[in-house]
């Protein structure tokens, strides 16, 4: 069978899924392009996990359709997907090595090949000496790395990671991030679900923001930021802050340790803001037009929708 | 299929390899012995001699020698040749045999005569009560003077321990024998005639089948015991492994692995794999026990035969063992799938344990059904009850052993069982699939109904 040549790895077309009265996903359409990292973003309870479950064929949509690699999902196609769910665990009393082998078997990987890859991955994630230990003896962070291995051990073409970095220390986040980028470089497609915008911003090529079961925006990070406009200012100043309270000028502010990110109100002029600040007698140390951060866009879009 | 086998293998290997499995396999039969045989033995063990004083007020104290003789003779088996005892036992009927076996564990009696004719009874009693109080006596027996003539007169036994019922009944029996013997002798029956006249008769039993043919002389014991052995086997297995099945089904939910697995295998494959895996573990353990038990029986039977004792002829047709196995499997699976169903509904093993309680009641009900069925195996009650899936494995087997029912009835009850198992599995799979991904809360019955419709 020759698979049709498609550039989209996952195509979700007008999909709806409800549980009783509650609509978890409402007429959602999205496209995940091959060889890219796709960020599925949204606040808690937006419908991210339900969407992913439908993609990996754990639940079926009520209406609409989903195509994986251009086909309707089959058990064989399932073997080409690696999934790290947000709700994840390990068999507590099973040894790490055996456990990984079991998960590999469930993806139809031959025993010998599985052994080789398990050693490789354990070494890569600095877990080699834990191979013969029971998983209950591992720290939470180590367990999470083992769970990560289960989702990539069978070298899937599509890797779906649901909050893969939550609860990890920065060193391990960096390690896993590096691996995700390596996977992309080797041609894999990655769906990355999170509500941590900083991480998404760093590694995603494309994003889709969903809130309250509906898609709010989709596109490459470039496009999204451009469409949102260059209307943010990174600001550092000493003096009266009352200027920032003028709603005709400022839509929102976000403070970090030593500077303030100001999201300008619609149609407001950055130059006017600068003038007003100087007029108020403030000493302006930094005034820079910046792209809005994904976090800013996220908060703006999510609160706007309320 | 490879995935299914992988699940079965994991389930099996992970469980068989545990220390608990090894320990249980070795300790299981020992514990069984401890909980069944030892209490019965303890019941009959008396650790010290019963010191008994007898005041025989009959003329010439005619009863005392017989009472003393009976009590002190039978209670001293250690002095006797043990082998003679066994041969004796085989010839007796079962009840007597059991009594005799029991007596081996009894302490003996030390029976002393107290001369009571020259002193007032009150005086004597005061003295004997004192001796009981000081711990010199366990009790004393007062035989009234006119006991041989008047049946309304009752002998009286004063004792320290009212609860030592076995000793009391032995004293009663000894006294009864003595009284009867005296009365008969008084009526002119000679000792020798007495022996001859009081010999028992035993019933010989032959079965007649539906074609009107007589069978070999049989022992009802086998027919009586085997269904109960089966019922007991099912009971023990379900008791031991029902919880394990439940735990296995809940495991992925508790450890939150379900979602990872469901992206690789169908929920039904996973569920069935777990059921089969655990069942194979159960089969392994039972197999070891049965083999060990079988080996012991063969060794034991050989030992008995070499000591000149022909084992009791069990007349069991070989087809019966096939039925035994089939109905065991059906019985086990029908209850195991119930546990699977419970497991698919709950989120933790503890919770499951509570919800699963009624299953045990159902199982015990099946056991009780076996009694009326055994007495009238072809009544319409028996026929109907042997078609009810949760009872049929035990009840049908009882019917097969007692009066083999028509083949179509056996086949029908098997079919009903198999269909029920499939139905239960189907139902469990639907609940399992939805319930698996619901973390943290127990499903209500209406919710479960909705899952079944939804899935």
Image (cartoon, grey):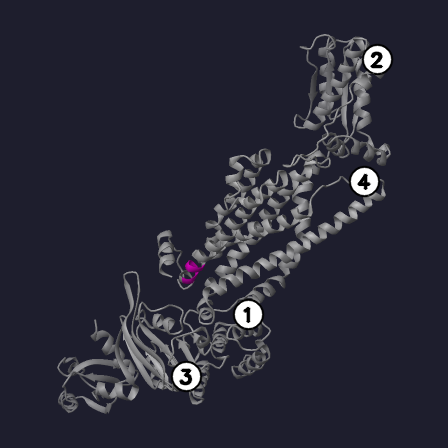
Asked if both marks, 3 and 2, belong to the same chain, the answer given is no
Q: Which of marks 4 and 3 is in front?
A: 3
Q: Do labels 4 and 1 share a chain?
A: no
Circle 3 crowding by C-alpha within 10 Å: few under 14, some 14–19, many from 20 = few
What span is colored magenta in the figure?
B429-433
For label 3, the SS is loop
The mark lying in front, picked from 4 and 1, is 4
What x and y, as percent, mark residue A118? Answer: 55, 79
Which residue lies under the disc numbered 3? Answer: A3
Write down the residue under mark 4: B310
Name the mark nearer the viewer: 4 or 2: 4
Rounded to the nearest angstrom, the CA distance separating label 4 from label 3 is 77 Å
Side (left or right) of B424 relative to B234: left
Question: What secondary structure prevails in the magenta region?
Answer: helix
Q: Label 3, label 2: how many angstroms apart (C-alpha)?
A: 109 Å
The chain letter for the residue carrying disc 4 is B
Secondary element under disc 4, as helix, strand or loop, is loop
Residue placed most toward the observer, B198 or B342: B198
Position of residue B116 relative to residue B77, above or below, is: above
- According to the picture, the residue beneath numbered tag 1 turns out to be A137
Sequence order check, earlier mark of 4 and 2: 2
Q: Are marks 4 and 2 in contact (CB under 8 Å)?
A: no
Measure the C-alpha gap from mark 2 to mark 1: 86 Å
Where residue A265 appears, as percent x and y from the top left, is 16, 83
Vertical position of residue A8 compared to residue B346: above or below:
below
Residue placed under numbered mark 2 in the picture: B190
Badges 1 and 3: C-beta atoms under 8 Å apart? no
């Amino acid at each position: 069978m020759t698979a049709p040549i498609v550039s989209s790895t996952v195509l979700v077309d007008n999909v709806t899924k409800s549980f009783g009265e509650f609509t978890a996903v409402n007429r959602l359409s999205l496209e995940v392009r091959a060889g890219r990292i796709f960020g599925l973003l949204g606040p808690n309870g937006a419908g991210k996990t339900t969407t992913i479950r439908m993609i990996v064929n754990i639940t079926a949509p009520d209406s609409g359709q989903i195509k994986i690699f251009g086909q309707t999902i089959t058990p064989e196609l399932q073997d080409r997907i690696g999934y790290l769910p947000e709700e994840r665990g390990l068999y507590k009393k099973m040894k790490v090595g055996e456990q990984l082998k079991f998960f590999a078997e469930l993806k139809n990987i031959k025993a010998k090949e599985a052994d080789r890859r398990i050693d490789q991955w354990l070494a890569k994630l600095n877990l080699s000496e834990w191979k013969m230990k029971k998983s209950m003896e591992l720290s939470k962070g180590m367990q999470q790395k083992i769970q990560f291995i289960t989702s990539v051990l069978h070298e899937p073409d599509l890797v779906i990671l649901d909050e893969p970095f939550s609860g990890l220390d920065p060193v391990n986040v960096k390690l896993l991030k590096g691996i995700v980028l390596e996977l992309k470089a080797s041609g894999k497609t990655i769906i990355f679900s999170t509500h941590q915008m900083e991480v998404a911003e760093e590694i995603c090529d494309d994003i889709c923001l969903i809130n309250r079961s509906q898609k709010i925006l989709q596109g490459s990070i470039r496009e999204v930021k451009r469409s949102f406009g260059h209307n943010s200012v990174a600001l550092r100043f000493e003096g009266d802050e009352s200027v920032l309270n003028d709603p005709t000028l400022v839509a929102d502010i976000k403070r970090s340790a030593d500077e303030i990110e100001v999201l300008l109100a619609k149609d407001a002029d950055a130059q006017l803001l600068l003038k007003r600040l100087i007029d108020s007698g403030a000493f302006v140390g930094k005034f820079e037009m910046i792209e809005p951060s994904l976090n800013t866009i996220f908060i703006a879009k999510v609160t706007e929708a309320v | 299929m490879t995935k299914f086998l992988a699940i079965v293998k994991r389930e099996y290997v992970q469980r068989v390899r545990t220390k608990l499995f090894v320990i249980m396999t070795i300790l299981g039969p020992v514990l069984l012995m401890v909980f069944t045989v030892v209490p019965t033995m303890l019941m009959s063990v008396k650790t010290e001699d019963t010191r008994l004083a007898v005041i025989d007020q009959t003329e010439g104290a005619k009863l005392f020698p017989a009472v003393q003789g009976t009590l002190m003779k039978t209670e001293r088996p250690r002095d006797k040749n043990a082998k003679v005892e066994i041969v004796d036992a085989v010839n007796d009927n079962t009840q007597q045999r059991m009594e005799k076996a029991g007596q081996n564990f009894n302490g003996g009696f030390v029976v002393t005569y107290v001369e009571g004719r020259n002193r007032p009874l009150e005086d004597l009693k005061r003295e004997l009560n004192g001796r009981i109080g000081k711990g010199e006596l366990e009790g004393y027996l007062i035989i009234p003077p006119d006991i041989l003539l008047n049946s309304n007169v009752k002998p009286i036994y004063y004792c320290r321990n009212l609860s030592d019922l076995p000793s009391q009944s032995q004293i009663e029996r000894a006294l009864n024998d003595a009284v009867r013997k005296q009365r008969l002798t008084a009526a002119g029956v000679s000792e020798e005639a007495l022996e001859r006249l009081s010999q028992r008769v035993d019933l010989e039993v032959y079965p007649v089948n539906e074609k009107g043919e007589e069978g070999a002389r049989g022992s009802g014991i086998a027919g009586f015991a085997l269904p109960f052995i089966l019922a007991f086997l099912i009971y023990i297995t379900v008791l031991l492994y029902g919880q394990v099945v439940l735990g296995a089904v809940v495991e992925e939910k508790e450890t939150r692995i379900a979602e990872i697995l469901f992206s690789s295998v169908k929920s039904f494959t996973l569920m069935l794999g777990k059921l089969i895996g655990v069942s194979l573990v159960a089969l392994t353990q039972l197999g070891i026990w049965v083999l060990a038990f079988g080996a012991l029986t063969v060794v034991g039977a050989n030992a008995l035969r070499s000591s000149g004792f022909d084992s009791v002829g069990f007349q069991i047709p070989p087809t019966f063992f096939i039925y035994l196995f089939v109905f065991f499997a059906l019985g086990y699976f029908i209850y195991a799938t119930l546990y699977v169903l419970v497991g698919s509904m709950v989120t933790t093993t503890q919770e499951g344990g509570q919800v699963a309680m009624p299953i045990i009641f159902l199982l015990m009900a099946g056991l009780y059904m076996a009694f009326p069925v055994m007495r009238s195996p072809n009544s319409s009650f028996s026929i109907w009850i042997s078609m009810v899936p949760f009872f049929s494995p035990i009840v049908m087997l009882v019917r097969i052993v007692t009066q083999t029912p028509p083949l179509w009835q056996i086949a029908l009850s098997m079919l009903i069982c198999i269909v029920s198992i499939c139905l239960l599995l189907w139902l469990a799979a639907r609940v399992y699939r939805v319930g698996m991904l619901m973390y943290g809360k127990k499903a209500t019955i209406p919710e479960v109904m909705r899952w079944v419709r939804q899935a």
